[in-house]
């Protein structure tokens, strides 16, 4: 596939995202479906992720260059303009190629008329770049590459850290690994990486974590197919440490991972502890990823597709002929992990389309869903059991405020989140990690214990 065609494919894939009708969640599969040549796939992905990452600023620049906005039916041409600007500003693509090949890509979309428009806009940007950038950067959301609602939320939540958060969100996150301690040690695996010519170092907080100096294809990782290692951010790996007091020395403990996809936390728990683990997700397709992850690692769990927020959760989890796989033990689970659906504001650097797909109104809806999940799952927890609440959000409404409200309405719940942890910072009755440049993702944890009668 030619570079022109690669740009046309990138534009097509960006259309549903910039129109608020889709995301980049299935980008790899969509790139493959467009028969993009292997050598061009990384380029297409870089364009799509890059445009989303810098979208607020690119969109403002595009508006300055156009006499009038493109009609919705020409969103693919708008996408070409955005990815042309992105190449000129942020990629090591020769300027002449960024202009001519991006403009020419309109022909591949069946819109030859747009070639002249794109060529004119991009050449004007080359001539007036300094002045145009200075003009749009007067608007803080544009200058900081964040939608206005999100920038306001970050400033309110973290008045001393919001600028650092924005900077971290605007950079690609590092590639972090989790060593399967059933098969190796971190020290031994670091030696294997060195032998393979892959530069890496031990994570600061996660005992099984390794951070790579530069991302590589997973198939280049020694023993990946055999289950020796997985890709998982350091923040997500801390889940197992927080559940350790409830699971250490309790072989066969009954554990439920309620929103398990894609399966990294379930897998980590099974690598560290000997458990009777049930895992569920509302999406059967995503649940299949959990099964594939566990199969690669040689681990077993009982999987079931179910809605953990449903008012009929107790019946669904009961011993019914239709759904015995995820059945709750009659005495309740010893531990429950609720990695709740959330805004994803702690992982924007890994999912930059969040800047386009999330709305301020989503936060209240998500908080309501999280509250239903907490209430439902609490009823499935055995007396004396532990529920670990987690999100990849940095917004208090989903985190500290959510837990405060739960504790206020739940007399038999008490927070047991340690206050002497080496990572994160206290956030109400939980612990908040803020997205760190060249470090861990943004994450929140709160550990809760159910009183015994």
Image (tube, rainbow, N blue to C red):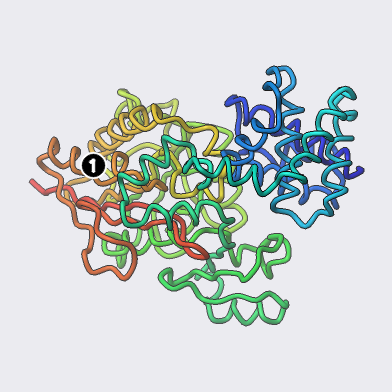
Residue 38 is situated, as x and y percent measured from the top left of the image, at 84, 50
Q: Please tell me how crowded label 1 is: few (under 14), some (14-19), or many (20+) other residues with Cα within 10 Å.
A: some
The reply, left or right, for residue 448 in relation to residue 215 is: left
Q: Quadrant of residue 371?
A: top left
Q: Image point 87% across, 46% down: which residue? A: 37
Q: Secondary structure at mark 1?
A: helix
Q: Image point 55% across, 76% down: which residue? A: 201
Residue placed most toward the observer, 316 or 260:
260
Q: Image point 52% across, 39% down: which residue? A: 354
The reply, left or right, for residue 11 in relation to residue 432 is: right
Which image quarter holds the N terminus? top right
Residue 402 is situated, as x and y percent measured from the top left of the image, at 25, 40
Q: Quadrant of residue 198?
A: bottom right
Q: Image point 51% across, 49% down: which residue? A: 263
Q: Which residue is mark 1?
A: 401
Residue placed most toward the observer, 288 or 411:
411
Q: Residue furthest left?
A: 453
């Amino acid at each position: 596939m030619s570079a022109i065609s690669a740009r046309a494919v990138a534009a097509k894939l960006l259309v549903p995202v910039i129109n608020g009708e889709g995301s980049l969640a299935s980008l790899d599969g969509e790139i493959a479906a467009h028969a993009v040549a292997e050598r061009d796939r990384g380029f297409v992905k870089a364009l799509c992720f890059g445009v989303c990452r810098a979208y607020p600023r690119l969109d403002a620049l595009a508006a300055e260059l156009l006499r009038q906005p493109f009609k919705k039916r020409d969103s693919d041409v708008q996408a070409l303009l955005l990815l042309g600007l992105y190449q000129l500003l942020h990629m090591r693509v020769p300027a002449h190629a960024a202009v001519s090949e991006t403009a020419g890509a309109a022909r591949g979309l069946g819109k030859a008329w747009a070639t002249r428009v794109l060529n004119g806009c991009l050449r004007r940007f080359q001539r007036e770049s300094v002045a145009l950038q200075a003009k749009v950067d007067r608007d803080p959301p544009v200058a900081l590459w964040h939608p206005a609602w999100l920038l306001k939320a970050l400033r309110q939540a973290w008045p001393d850290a919001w600028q650092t958060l924005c900077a971290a969100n605007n950079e690609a996150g590092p590639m972090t690994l989790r060593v399967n301690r059933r098969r190796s040690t971190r020290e031994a695996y670091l030696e294997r990486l060195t032998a393979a010519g892959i530069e890496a170092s031990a994570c600061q907080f996660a005992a099984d974590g390794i951070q790579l100096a530069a991302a590589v294809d997973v198939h280049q990782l020694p023993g990946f197919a055999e289950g020796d290692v997985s890709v998982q951010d350091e923040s997500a790996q801390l889940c197992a440490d927080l559940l350790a007091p409830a699971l250490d020395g309790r072989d066969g403990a009954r554990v439920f991972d309620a929103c398990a996809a894609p399966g990294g936390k379930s897998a980590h728990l099974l690598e560290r502890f000997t458990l009777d683990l049930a895992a569920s997700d509302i999406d059967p397709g995503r649940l299949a990823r959990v099964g594939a992850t566990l199969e690669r690692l040689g681990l077993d769990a009982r999987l079931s597709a179910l809605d953990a927020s449903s008012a009929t959760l107790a019946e669904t989890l009961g011993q019914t002929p239709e759904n015995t796989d995820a059945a709750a033990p009659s005495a309740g689970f010893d531990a429950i992990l609720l990695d709740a659906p959330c805004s994803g504001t702690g992982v924007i650097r890994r999912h930059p389309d969040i800047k386009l797909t999330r709305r301020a109104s989503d936060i209240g809806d998500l908080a309501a869903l999280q509250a239903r999940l907490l209430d439902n799952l609490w009823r499935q927890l055995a007396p004396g059991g532990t529920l670990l609440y987690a999100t990849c959000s940095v917004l208090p409404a989903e985190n500290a405020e959510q837990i405060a409200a739960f504790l206020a309405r739940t007399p038999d719940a008490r927070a047991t989140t340690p206050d002497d942890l080496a990572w994160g910072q206290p956030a109400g009755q939980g612990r908040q990690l803020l997205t760190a440049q060249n470090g861990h993702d943004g994450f929140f944890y709160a550990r809760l214990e159910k009183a015994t009668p």
